[in-house]
Amino acid sequence: MKGFGFKGFRVWCDAVPSAGEAAAAAAAAATAATAAAATTAPVTPATAAAAAAEVLAAAAAAAAATAAAAAAAGTASAATTTAAATTTTPPPPAPAPAAAAATAAAAAAAAAATAAAAAAATAAAAAAAAAMGGPKRRRGLNSVLSDIRKSTKDTAAAAAAAAAAAAAAPAAATAAAAAAQQQQQQQQQQQHQQQQQQQQQQQDQQQQQQQQQQNMNSLKQLASIVKWWVARKFLSSTKKAKPS
């Protein structure tokens, strides 16, 4: 009876704090109820199996909360990437789909890790209950409860790692979307500069053509003036050459 006390079970979910706190509260309530039952009732294979079932229920609740947090983080990161990709008029660059795929992969990996940890805890608790209820009772109650505590701690560690991965996924997706948007803005600036350069070149060409046209007009005017002056001189010399 003395070896059946639990210190508590907590799951920290950074991605969705409300879900993590709810899972931790459920686990704490389950362990408190188990400890209260252990102090008032004799330890039997049935009570040990009930305690293992309560631990499994708490672990399953924590796994469900972590999976929900990972799914919410993946959905939020995908929505952020889609919004960042659709705010500008040109088509989005290549890093945005890669960021969405990386976010989805991280969320899937976190959910898979949580599910694997829950499955391991379930298997360990089932093995402990079977060992306690067996005919030979080769293992003591304290050893079985120690295994259950270790499995619970492993489940909590796996859930915390999955929550950390799910919390880091939106930040990575946001950074990738920001980098993609910055790259797209740089491309737009380069295109704008190229358009300005082309417009400047066209204006320079138009000015050169206008200057050449003005020069041609000036030459034509000068040629007409020279012709008029030569004709006038010729006429005056002809009048002077006639006999009186």
Image (cartoon, grey):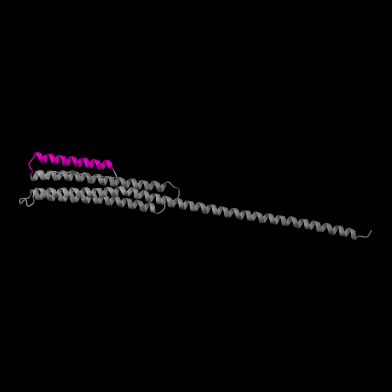
Q: In which quarter of the image is the N terminus?
A: top left
Q: Residue at x 63, y 53 (%)?
A: 207
Q: Quadrant of the C terminus?
A: bottom right
Q: Which residue is drawn at 10% across and 40% down?
A: 39
Measuring from the top left, give residue 70's x and y in whole percent.
28, 47
Measuring from the top left, give residue 183's x and y in whole percent.
43, 52
Q: In this view, does 198 lie to the left or right of 103?
A: right
- Residue 153 seen by the camera: yes
Q: Which residue is drawn at 26% across and 42% down?
A: 19
**Image: magenta residue range:** 17-43
Q: Provide the major secondary structure of the magenta segment.
A: helix
Magenta-drawn stretch contains 142: no
Outermost residue, left side: 136
Magenta-drawn stretch contains 24: yes
Q: How many numbered discs, if any?
A: 0
Q: Is residue 83 left or right of residue 17?
A: right
Measuring from the top left, give residue 139's x and y in whole percent.
8, 51
Q: Which residue is drawn at 39% across and 46% down?
A: 83
Where residue 11 sits, quadrant-wise, is: top left
- Residue 118 seen by the camera: no
Q: In this view, does 212 lie to the left or right of 194?
A: right
Q: Which of 219 and 30 is in front in this view?
A: 30
Outermost residue, right side: 244
Measuring from the top left, give residue 191's x and y in whole percent.
49, 53
Q: Nearer the viewer, residue 19 or 74?
A: 19
